[in-house]
Amino acid sequence: MDANSRIYVDSEIGKLKKVIVHRPDEGIARITPKRAGELLFDDIVHLPNMQEEHDIFIGVLKAFLGKENVLEVRDLLAESTRDEESKYEVINKITDFEELPYSFIPRLAGLSPEQLADTLITGYLEPEDRILFDPIPNLIFTRDIAVTVKGHVIITKANKTARFRENFLTRLIFSSHPVFRRLKADGRTINLNRVDKFPPNKKGETISVEGGDVMVLNKDYLLIGCSERTNEYAFQMIKNYLFDRGIIKNVVQVNIPAERTYMHIDTVFTQINHNHMVAYRPIVQEGLGSYVDVHRSNGETVEYPSLRDFLLAEVNPQMEFIWAGRGESPYQEREQWTDGCNLVALKPGVAITYDRNPITERAFKDFGYKVIGAEKILRDIDNGKITPDKVENTIITIPSNELSRARGGSHCMTCPIEREEI
C-alpha cells in the first residue's frame, strides 16, 4: 500500500476500495470452553474450518477490490515495528499491561517484525514454545478497531478488558505505519484509547466505543450507537471533535438495549443500497428499547422514537427496509442472532452475508436481489464468465459454520479505510 494512498469514507455503500482485515490466527485454537465467555467468544471453534471460511470471504474482497487493497493486520503490524522506537514503545506497554517480567523485553525485541507481530497477536512466543498472554480472538472483527469518517480516523477504545491489547496494537499501527503516520501529522486522528488525554468523566465513566457502533451514512450524517459496548461519554467526545473541526453537520445518537444480543448497532441494521437497509424490525421500526437523538452542529437536538422514523424524515424518504427473518418471529430473532442484519456493501446493491439465514435470503429475493454463494461467484470470475464490475443487485453468501460462532458478520470483519464518494 502506497504511503500516499487516500484515506476517505463518506458512506456505508460507496464502492469499497481499501479495507483492513485479520485472518483467524492460532491464538483462537488455544481458547478453552471455560475461558470462551471471558474472551468474548460464545463457543470454541475449529480453527482450520474457520480459516477456510474466512479465506473464501477474503477471496471475494480481493476479487472486487484487488489483492493489494485488502490489508492484513499482521502485515501492518510487522511493517509498523520495523522502526526501533515504535517497537520498544509497544513492547514496553504490553509488557506492563500483561504483567510480564521485564526480562522478556529483550527477548521480544530480538524477534523479527513478523515474529513479533505473531507473538503480539496470538500471545504465543514460538521460539520458546511458551504462551505469554491471552489470545485476542476478536481481532478478526477489524470494524471495531478504528473508523474512517471522511478523511479522518477515530481510533477506538474497547469496552471489555479482553480487547485492550487490540487497542495497543491499533494505536501502534496508526501512529507508526507509513500509510497512517501522515494522518497523525496532519491532525486527522482522534485517538480515544489515549486514556491519559481522556480521563474518567464526572460519573466515573471511561471512554468506551467500538467501530460496530459507528456508521457514516452520508456526508452530513454520522451514526453512533450507545449500546452494550459504547457509552455516552465516548459519543460526546467524538461529537465535539467532529463539530469543532467542521467535519460533519449531524451526529446521531442511536440508543439500543445494552445487551449482548444487540452488542453494536451493526447487529441490528446495515445499509446495502441507496434505498435499502437490512434491519431487525423490533428495534428499527418498533423502537424496542431504543430511540434516536439527532445532534446538529448548530446546537439543536431532535428526538425520534425509532431509527426508521429518523431515516425517513431526515435521510431518505424512499428508504425501504429488508427485515431479517422477513420480520416474522421466531425467524427474525434467530437470524438477527446469526448476523442476518450484518452485511458489508462492496458497492451499492452488492453485499456479503452469511449463508445460514434462509428466511432473510427470501426477503432479499422479494426485493429483487440475486443470492449467490461466494465459491460459485469466485469460480465464475476465475473462468471469465463474469467480471466484478458487472455484478449488480447481488447478495453474496459466505460459509459460516465456524465464523458465525464468534458473533460477528461480514460488516464486523471489515474496517474500510477508503470508499468512492457517493
Image (cartoon, rainbow, N blue to C red):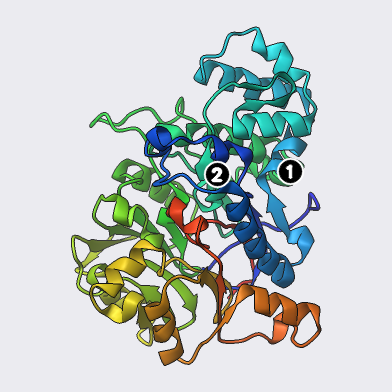
Q: Earlier in the sequence, mark 2 or mark 1?
A: 1
Viewer-proximal residue, 346 or 98?
98
**Residue with the mark numbered 2:** 139
| Residue 200 drawn above or below residue 344 | above
Number of on-image labels: 2
**Residue with the mark numbered 1:** 75
| Residue 250 drawn above or below residue 86 | below
Residue 417 image point, x, y percent: 63, 57
Callout 1: SS:
helix
* Mark 2 residue crowding within 10 angstroms, few (<14) / some (14–19) / many (20+): many
Q: Mark 1 belongs to which amino acid?
A: Asp
Q: Residue at 61% across / 8% down in the picture? A: 102
Residue 365 image point, x, y percent: 45, 89
Q: Mark 2 belongs to which amino acid?
A: Leu
Give the left or right position of residue 92, taking residue 4 as reference. left
Q: Residue at 72% across / 14% down in the picture? A: 107
Give the left or right position of residue 40, taking residue 273 as reference. left
Residue 325 image point, x, y percent: 33, 77
Q: Quadrant of residue 373?
A: bottom right
Q: Residue at 26% across / 63% down in the picture? A: 292
* Mark 1 residue crowding within 10 angstroms, few (<14) / some (14–19) / many (20+): some
Q: Quadrant of residue 129?
A: top right
